[in-house]
Amino acid sequence: TFDVSPPFLNRVLQGQPKVHLTAVDDLSLEIPKGKTFSLVGESGCGKSTVARLVVGLYRPSAGSVEIEGLDLATLNSRKAMAPVRRRLQMIFQDPFASLNPRWRVGNIIAEPIRFHRLVSGEKAILERVADLLTLVGLSPEDSIKFPHEFSGGQRQRISIARALASEPEFLICDEPTSALDVSVQAQILNLMKKLQREFNLTYLFISHDLAVVYHISDDIGVMYLGRLVEWGPAREVFAQPRHPYTRMLLDAIPDLEMSGRARTPIAGEVPSPITPPGGCHFHPRCPFANDRCRSEAPKPLRVGTGEVRCHGVEEGRLPASLRPEGGR
Ligand code: SF4
Ligand code: MG
C-alpha cells in the first residue's frame, strides 16, 4: 500500500514570506496496489498540492508521506530520492509543457531508461522505446518526430510512455485529460485502465470532474479547501453521496449515464485558502449550515464503508436527497 499518513498539517509558503496557507490538512490516504484512488474537488481545493507532496516536489511542514513504509522526508538528496522517483511517476494536465520541445520523442522516452540504467546498450534502448510507443497506441516511427508534430491526445500518450519507461508502480495523474476533447478523454482513460491491468499500476487520479473519475476509480475522495470531506468506494459515493459538497458536485455533472438529470451549476465560489472560513470550511455555501457548522470543524465519521465530515450527517438532519423529487 501507499500511505499518506496523518497527521498531515502542511503549510505551504505562498509568495511572500509569513503568508502561510494550509493547503492540505489532516489528510490520510491509503491506496491498495493496483487500484485507483481519485481526489476530486474544484480548483483551489488542494488536490494538486497532494500530488506534489506525494512525489516529493513539495515537502510537508508537519506529518509525513510514506511509500510502502518508507518516509520520503528521510530521503534528502536527489540521489536518495532517485529510486523512489523511478517508482512514482507523475502525469500532468498539459503534456506540452512537460515534454521538451527540442527533443525528439524517442529521446524523451529513452531519457529515464538511460538515467535509471534500466536497459543497457543503445540497440536495446531503441527497442524498448519502440515497445513503449506501441504500448500507448503510437507507432515506433513516431520516435523521430518532435512533440509539436502531435495532437494533444497523442502528446498525452507520449507522456504516459515516458512515465512507463521508468517502470513505475505508482502513477499520479493530475488532471491528465482536462485539456482534451471529450472523445479523446475517453480514449486516454481507456488506455490508462488497460495499462493499469497489464502492469498492476496504482493510480492517484486528480480531477475537478466527478464524471471523468467515475469509470476509472475504485475509491473517491472529495476535497474541499484542503480537507477530505467525504471518501469511499466510487460506486457508493455516486449512488449515495452524503456530504452536501459531494451532492453539489454530482448535481453539476451534465450528462452522467446513471442520472440523465439537468445540470445544476455549482453555487458560489471556493473561498481563499489563506483565510478559510472557520468551523466547517463549506458552511458559507451550504444550505444546511447551523451555528455548530460555523464554529466547529467536523470530524471524520464512519458511514457505510466510507467516511464523511459533516455535522448535518452526524446529527441526522440532512434530507435523503438534495433534490426535492428524490430518486437517489
Ligand atoms: Fe453543511 Fe454543516 Fe455539513 Fe458543513 S458541517 S457541510 S456546513 S451541514
Ligand atoms: Mg490543480
Image (tube, rainbow, N blue to C red):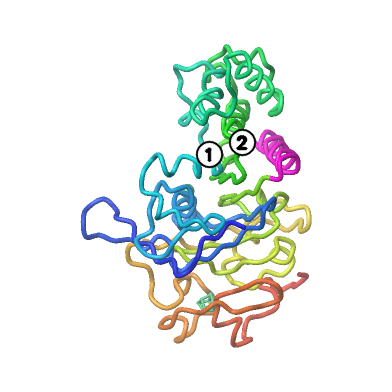
Q: Is 236 positioned to the left or the right of 88 in the image?
A: right
Q: Main secondary structure of the magenta part?
A: helix
User: Mark 2 or 1 closer to N-term?
Assistant: 1
- For disc 2, the marked residue is 167
The percent coordinates of residue 166 (x first, y second) are 57, 33
Residue 326: quadrant of the picture? bottom right
Q: Which mark is residue 86?
A: 1
Residue type at the position of mark 2: Glu
Residue 157: quadrant of the picture? top right
The percent coordinates of residue 249 (x first, y second) are 60, 60
Farthest-out residue, front = 120
| Residue that appears at 42% across and 44% down | 80
| Residue that appears at 74% across and 62% down | 235
Q: Quadrant of the N terminus?
A: bottom right
Label 1 residue SS:
helix
Placement of 84 over or under 277, stated as above or below = above
Crowd around label 2: few <14 · some 14–19 · many ≥20 (10 Å): some
Q: Are marks 2 and 1 in contact (CB under 8 Å)?
A: yes
| Residue that appears at 52% across and 73% down | 286
Placement of 207 over or under 102, stated as above or below = below
Q: Which mark is residue 317?
A: none
Crowd around label 1: few <14 · some 14–19 · many ≥20 (10 Å): many
* Nearer to the camera, 137 or 308: 137
* Mark 1 Cβ inside 8 Å of ligand 2: no
Residues in magenta, as a range: 181-200
Placement of 85 over or under 101, stated as above or below = below
Q: State how far apart marks 2 and 1 are (Cα).
A: 7 Å
Placement of 215 over or under 121, stated as above or below = below
Q: Quadrant of the C terminus?
A: bottom right
User: Magenta span has 190?
Assistant: yes
* Nearer to the camera, 317 or 116: 116
